[in-house]
Amino acid sequence: MTTGAVVTFVLVAIVLVVLLWAVAQYNGFVRLRNLVQESWRQIDVELHRRHDLIPNLVESVKGYAAHERGVFDEVTRARAAAAGPGAGPAEQAAQENALNAALGRLLAVAENYPVLRASENFQQLQAELANTEDRVAAGRRFYNANVRELNTKVETFPPNVIASMFGFTRAEYFEADDPQVRQAPTVGF
Amino acid sequence: MRRGVQTGAVVVLGLVGLGIAGVSLGADHPAGGMLVVMAAVAVLVAVGGAWLHRKRQERLTAWAHAVGWTYSPRDPGRGLATLQTGRPFGQGHSRRVTEVLTGTYEGHPAVSFTYGWATGSGDEKRRYEAHVVGIALPAYLPTLELTPEGLGARLAKALGARDLQLESAAFNAAYRVDAPDARTAHAILHPRTLERLLRPDAVGMSWRIEGTWLLSWETGSTDTERIAPRLGVLAAVVRGVPRHVWQDHGYDPAADGAPGTWSL
């Protein structure tokens, strides 16, 4: 075999290896992007579950504290904003933070009514809300883990070469800035 | 037990036979004295081994009675050797479950046993043992395995094995996490459980959720001193599983009341 043939063979082998690597990286990016999107949709499901609980909670408190109209209106507005479609992770996080703040004030009102606090219906709603908050928190952690993996791949070398060639970009984390969101809203009964 | 006694009796008889042969040859015969000594030593070893074995059985029985558990030298028909398919089960041949201790721990049905298996045959045959400790779960959960991060884990990952990364760098450095269902694994391994698993009594433990069992295994035979500490870690993992994870798998802890209302 001539030197030229050997060199050609080696060059072709190198090109093939690089191509295979590039294909594997591209497929990895697609897989991660789909995982991020799917896990975001799962959070959306849990958030809607939470949003659906809130009207019942408002009605149960209204039955005892109808005069606290300002608080009820605030919760209703915040819920409507959070339940609206099309928000990205950062915007959704801000809306959920606002909703949590409004819910906190609603539950603070409920604390002043012992009969309400003792009612089975209200306690059940509280337990369901806490359970749903746990689901949202779990979904957030899973989503953020996938985002972390995608972002690390987008930013590290050499995968970032493939990322920039094919338009793969960083994803947004779903972050809760409000410390109250870090735990399920509870009332000290 | 009966087969062991029979085997032991045959061995002792054989050794006695050797001794008699030695005596027959006479002390002056070069081989005679040697045979007698060998037979005597072998009988001592056999008798001593049987005595040690009996003492161990007595210790395990006493330990079981002291903590309100029950002891059985063999698997009492519960299929313990097939509780899970992952390590240490499903390896080699001549699998055997012995020294079975059953009871409850913090209200959870629990079990401890020595699991033995062999690999190879003839001169290449090797026998292994693992001390398995486990808690029964109230419902099926997707498989989740934690093993200490080490050279073996790193080699496995280099060959494409899974390792779920959580949000704690210290946890990721301490453990390799293998879970086909990453979502449920993330839900189970939440920050409080990660923190618990980084405490000294938990670091270095291998455990796996598979089906309706959470099992931990360590090399060697049953060590009663290690049962409670390991069950403590396993019970903490079970306590930490969020309610919604159980609900997603057909069980509601709130509806079921206190732990321990299910049984083996």
Image (tube, rainbow, N blue to C red):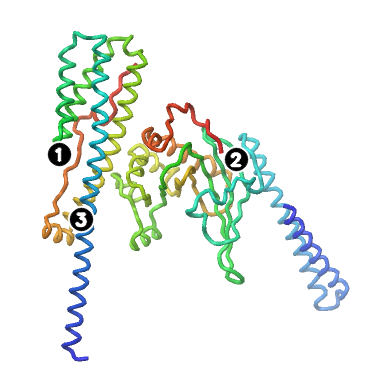
Q: Identify the residue shown where x is 40% and y is 42%.
A: B197
How crowded is the residue under tag 2: few (<14 C-alpha within 10 Å), some, or many (20+)? Answer: many
Identify the residue position indicated by label 1 in the image.
Answer: A88
**Image coordinates for residue B203, horizontal then vertical, percent:** 42, 46
B101 left or right, relative to A174: right
How far is the residue under mark 2 from the one under mark 1? 52 Å
Query: Which amino acid, by three-letter code, is at mark 3?
Result: Phe
2 and 1 marks in contact (CB < 8 Å): no
What residue appears at the point 58 percent right and 47 percent down from the top-left corner?
B223
* Residue bearing mark 3: A29
Chain letter of mark 2 equals B
Do marks 3 and 1 share a chain? yes
Disc 3 on helix, strand or loop?
A: helix
Q: Height in image: B163 above or below B12?
A: above
The kind of secondary structure element at disc 1 is loop
Q: Position of residue A176 (x, y in %)?
A: 20, 34
| Residue holding disc 2 | B102
